[in-house]
Image: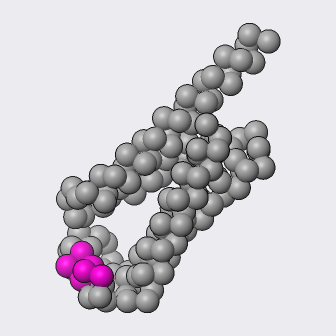
Amino acid sequence: MRKFLIIFTLFIAIGAVGGAIMMWVDPSGNGWGGAPMLDLLRAKMPWPDIFFKDFVPSGFALLAVNGLTQFLAARMLIRKHPRAYWAVLACGIILMLWIVLEWWVWGFNLVSNLYFVFGLVEAGSSVYWLRRSSIERVSE
């Protein structure tokens, strides 16, 4: 389970870094089809003239919220930190909340739906592991 979650958290983290870089390299979204999404962000999010002139702030948010947190959880898993599964649980919940926000702005789509499932897998795996380890402690 730990090795699976290490690979899984790193996969999500690398995807977030890639998405952030994509937003910084082409902040207008024209090259990767994001321009219509930027218009929806401007229409639905607060302070559109400050945060949604382009995708640069969104790239930083993606990196901070889903990239760095997932890397931290992976590092904790690699080092066998006693709270690693709590970190992965938090990352799964954060990812699902991020996707709920995406659904609110853009509606359902394949990529968002898939990443919601990824968050669900993270959270579910963590809960399973945390329950299992607490049962093992009680039986000792």
Q: Quadrant of the C terminus?
A: top right
Query: What residue is at 48 percent from the left and 52 percent from the top?
Result: 94
- Residue 40, percent across and down? 21, 73
Q: Do we see residue 42 in this rendering?
A: no
Query: What residue is at 58 percent from the left and 44 percent from the top?
Result: 4
- Looking at the picture, tell me which residue is in the foreground, 103 or 124: 124
The colour scheme is one colour
| Highlighted range, magenta | 32-37
Query: What residue is at 68 percent from the left and 44 percent from the top?
Result: 84
- Residue 138, percent across and down? 73, 13
Q: Quadrant of the N terminus?
A: top right
Q: Do we see residue 90 in this rendering?
A: yes
Q: Is residue 119 above or below residue 59?
A: above
Q: Is residue 109 above or below residue 127?
A: below
In this rendering, position of residue 128 left or right of residue 2:
left
- Looking at the picture, tell me which residue is in the foreground, 122 or 99: 122
Number of numbered discs on residues: 0
Query: What residue is at 59 percent from the left and 45 percent from the top?
Result: 5
- Residue 77, percent across and down? 70, 47
- Residue 79, percent across and down? 78, 49
Q: Is residue 96 above or below residue 16?
A: above
* The magenta stretch spans residue 20: no
In this rendering, position of residue 10 left or right of residue 52:
right
* The magenta stretch spans residue 34: yes
